[in-house]
Amino acid sequence: MGDLGYVAGMTWGWTGVRGTWGGPDAVRSMDLMVERLGVSWTAITLAALQDHPQSTRIQFRDEPTVTDDEVRWAVREAKARGLKVCLKPVVNVRNGTWRAHINFFDLDVPPEPKWSEWFASYTEFIVHHARIAAEEGAEMLCIGCEMVQTDRREAEWRALVAEVRAVYDGLVTYNCDKYQEDHVGWWDAVDVISSSGYYPVNDWENQLDRIEPVVTAVGKPFFFMEAGCPSRVGSPALPNDWNLRGAPSEQAQVDWYEAAFTACARRDWVSGFMLWDWPAKLYDEADAPTDDDYCMFGKAAEGVVRRAFTDAQRR
C-alpha cells in the first residue's frame, strides 16, 4: 500500500464526456490546474450511465462516457506533471436522478430488479477501471461516490473490494456522501475513508466533531474526496445545491473556502481535500466574474486554495 500523505487535490474532467479528454483544451486545463492551485493530487473522474435508479445495467462502454484510451491519456498527463492520481469512476442516472437514490428491494421479489444484478454490473464497471488504474500506476482508486442507498449492502461492497484487490494493489477508498461518515459499516474493508465535504460555512466544527470518532475508531486515514462551493450568493449555507438561485459572487466562494480550510487545519486527522471541480475545457478567464459554478479558475478563491495547499504541504 502507498502512503496517503496530504491530499492537495482537485477533481479533473467531470463528467468525462467522450471526445473532451485529449487535445489542446484538456492539456491547457490540466496545466492551469497545476499552475494556479499548486495541487499534488488529482482525481481523474468520469461517469457512466444507467437509465434510471432501478436499472441494473451500467453502460460504461457507451457514449457519452470517455473511452479507455481517454482515461489512460488523462492519468498519464497528470502523472507527467508530477501529480498523484486517484481514478474515480462514478455511476450517474441518465434520467437525472441523483445516484444516491439507486435502490432495490432488500429481499428478492420475482421479477423485480435485484441488488445482485446491479452489483454484478457495477462490479464489472469498477474492476474494469481498477485494471486501468493498476496498469497506469494510479496511486488510488475510488470505488464509489455518494451511493447512500447502497451503503447498507455491506456484503456486496466487501465482495467488490475483494475483486478490486485481486487486480489492483494501490490505495482503495470509498467516497460516502455528506452526513454519512458514521453510517457506513464496512470502512475496515478500504484503506482510506473519504467523504463529500459540502458542509454549511458555519457548521464545520460540528461536522468535524461528529466525524472524528469514526476516523479514530476505524484507524484509517481520512480526507474529503469532494468539497467545494459555487461562487454564488447563498451557496456557502448550502454548498451541495448546484441548482441554488443566486447572483454570482466570488466573495461567497472565498468565505466558504476560508471556513473549510481553517476548521480542517486544526484537525490533524483530516489528510486534505480533493476539491470540486476543474473541467477538461475551462471557461474564458475573462468570464470568471460571471461564472457561478464550483470551478474557481480565475476567481478570488483560486488564491485561497493555493495558499491553503501550500501551507498544508509545508506542515
Image (tube, rainbow, N blue to C red):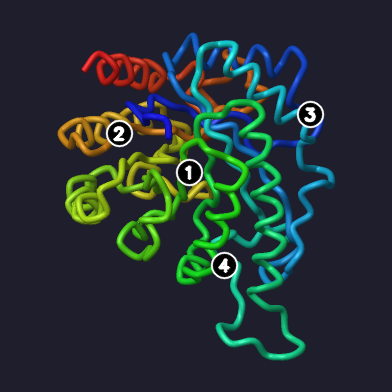
For label 3, the residue is 69
Element marked by disc 2: strand
Task: From this view, report whether residue 203 is shown above or below residue 86.
Answer: below
Give the CA separation, mark 1 to mark 3: 22 Å
Q: Earlier in the sequence, mark 1 or mark 3?
A: 3
Q: Earlier in the sequence, mark 4 or mark 3?
A: 3
For label 4, the residue is 101
CB contact under 8 Å: marks 2 and 3: no
The residue located at (25%, 48%) in the rendering is 219
Q: Residues within 10 Å of mark 2 (few under 14, many from 20)?
A: many
The residue located at (68%, 68%) in the rendering is 118
Q: Residues within 10 Å of mark 3 (few under 14, many from 20)?
A: few
For discs 4 and 1, the disc positioned in front in the rendered view: 1
Where, by quadrant of the figure, is residue 306 drawn? Answer: top left
The amino acid pointed to by label 2 is Ser
CB contact under 8 Å: marks 4 and 3: no
Foreground residue among 142 and 34: 142
Residue 221 x %, y % = 31, 41
The amino acid pointed to by label 4 is His
CB contact under 8 Å: marks 4 and 1: no
The amino acid pointed to by label 3 is Asp
For label 1, the residue is 172
Tell me: 151 left or right of 200.
right
Tell me: 312 left or right of 7.
left
